[in-house]
Every structure is written in C-alpha cells, then in structure tokens.
Amino acid sequence: MQRIGILPHLGKPKARELAHRVKEMLEVAGVEIWVPQEVSDELQWENTSTLHVGHEPLGVDAAVVLGGDGTLLHAAGFLAPFGIALLGVNLGYLGFLTEIEAKELEPAVGRLVARDYEIEDRMLLEAVVHGENRTERFLAVNDIVITRSAFARMIHLAIDVEGVSVGNFLADGLIISTPAGSTAYSLSAGGPIVHPRLETILITPICPHSLATRSILALPDEVVSVRLVTDRESEVLLTADGQAGVSVAPAESVVVQRADVKAKFIKFGQRSFYEVLGNRLNYPALHPPHPNS
C-alpha cells in the first residue's frame, strides 16, 4: 500500500485548510498517510491504523508539501536523505520550485495516487564548517551563503576550487549554489540562470569590491573551499537555504561539495523550465516587444 506524507506550512491558514482536503482525498483513495508530530498536534490528527505520526517518514513513498518555496526547501532538506519524492503546492509569492497551484490540487492528488508522474532529481550541496573544536554539516537545495552580519564591514574571502585559488577579495559575502538555486539569491547577486537539470556548482560573490570579480561555474564533483582572511574584524555567518545557520570564526574554514543524496521533485510535465522562468520571474527575453509597438 502507498504511504504519502502531508507537510503544510502551519502558519498559513490556507495550507492548513488544504491539508485537511488532501487527507480526505487520500483516505478515500485507500492510501496510508504520514505526518510529522507537530502537524498532528496542530491539526489534531490522531494516530490510527492508516494515519501514521512520527518524527521520521518511515515507509513514505511521496509527500505533498503545502506552502511556498521556503516550505518546499525545508521539506526537501529533511526528506532528501530518505529518498522521498515531493509534490510542491504553491501558496506563496513566487513558487518557483513548486509544481502546481492550489486550484490544481485535486487532479494532482489523483495523479499522485495513480503514480502518474515523473521524478526529477536535483543535486544538493553539503557544507562543512571546520573549526578547532567543531565540525558542523549543512545540506542545501538552493544555496550556501557566507556573509557579513548586518552591521559588520566587508569580509576578506579566499576561495579555492580543487586546491587552486580562484578568488581573494573583499565583499559582502559569497553564494555557493546549485542550479536550482541559480534563480534565487544568486540571481539577485548577478549570477547566471542555469537549467536545474544541469549539474554544476555556482560561485557568486555578493557586492565584491572589484570590477573583475564574476560568477564561476565549477564542475559538480569539485570541492570548493572558503577561508576567512584574518586581516579584518567582522562577524561572519553561514546559512543553508536561508534557514539553518551558524557563525564562522576567522580561524575556521568552509568546505562545500555536491552531497551524496539528491532531492526528488514530482513533475507532471505540464510546463517547462522556460515557461516557469517567464511566468514567475517575467524574464524579458520571453516577452519581446511587438514589432508595431
């Protein structure tokens, strides 16, 4: 029997409402359901023979994620190690990573139960902060960001790829992103748009104090090392997908590489990446002026 998870953004009333609808549709279809403990507590769903509550998604085949890109990023980071495919339902602003809108929910759940979909694998990044007394690991679907704190000066970064220096400059920070993350913070910082099915590691400086410093696309199997040059006193922060984060001391280093797990996104083949690019970001190349205008 199939077991499908439901992960709503509990802070959004619409997501809570749709979570009840998804639960009803799955129950009618005879599908087992899994939800995290906090979802069960908030929505007052009790553990039964067909509704499973727990901290780990044991035996889950797929999950419906109700929210925006942030909700989907959080769910992907949590569920990727378990190999669970995600169906993102957009209830946010951009919804660049999500597959469907709320109005498409009912037929989408039907296709989900019938296994009428494709799975698109997305590479993830793993960042490891190495210090004298700690080693901390972070997983990111979109990006790893190393940046100065709100009131700090620019930071001095030394960047190596496969042990070879590719940058030594002052900047507000650095974004190391996946292709999926190329349309997020990296794009705002002047990075290129990369098709999410390509595999590369994007290295994009944030406001570098140099006209010659530009984004670099590294090979997916290469290792990116970032070191803080200790000639400046600045508080430095590392964040993964804008959610989990930690302070980085001058004597510490950050190593980023492709993770050994991938995120799995459910696709119905209804729209291409370029259609999403035009609809979500209003990419001007997709909307040329009329010849007579």
Image (cartoon, rainbow, N blue to C red):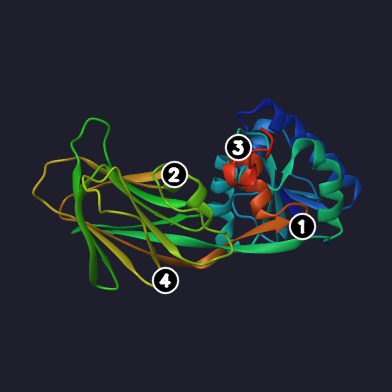
> Where is residue 215, by image quadrant?
bottom left
SS type, badge 1: loop
Q: Which residue is mark 3?
A: 94
Q: Nearer the viewer, residue 279 or 19?
A: 279
Give the image location of residue 170, x and y in percent. Answer: 19, 47
Identify which amino acid the numbered label 2 is placed on: Tyr
Residue 241 in sight: no
At label 4, counting other C-alpha atoms closer than 10 Å, the crowd grade (few under 14, some 14-19, many 20 or more) is some
Q: CA distance from mark 3 to mark 2?
A: 13 Å
SS type, badge 3: loop
At label 3, counting other C-alpha atoms closer than 10 Å, the crowd grade (few under 14, some 14-19, many 20 or more) is few
> Where is residue 122, by image quadrant?
bottom right
Q: N-terminal of the two: label 1 or label 3?
A: 3
Q: N-terminal of the two: label 3 or label 4?
A: 3
> Where is residue 15, by image quadrant?
top right
Identify which amino acid the numbered label 1 is placed on: Gly
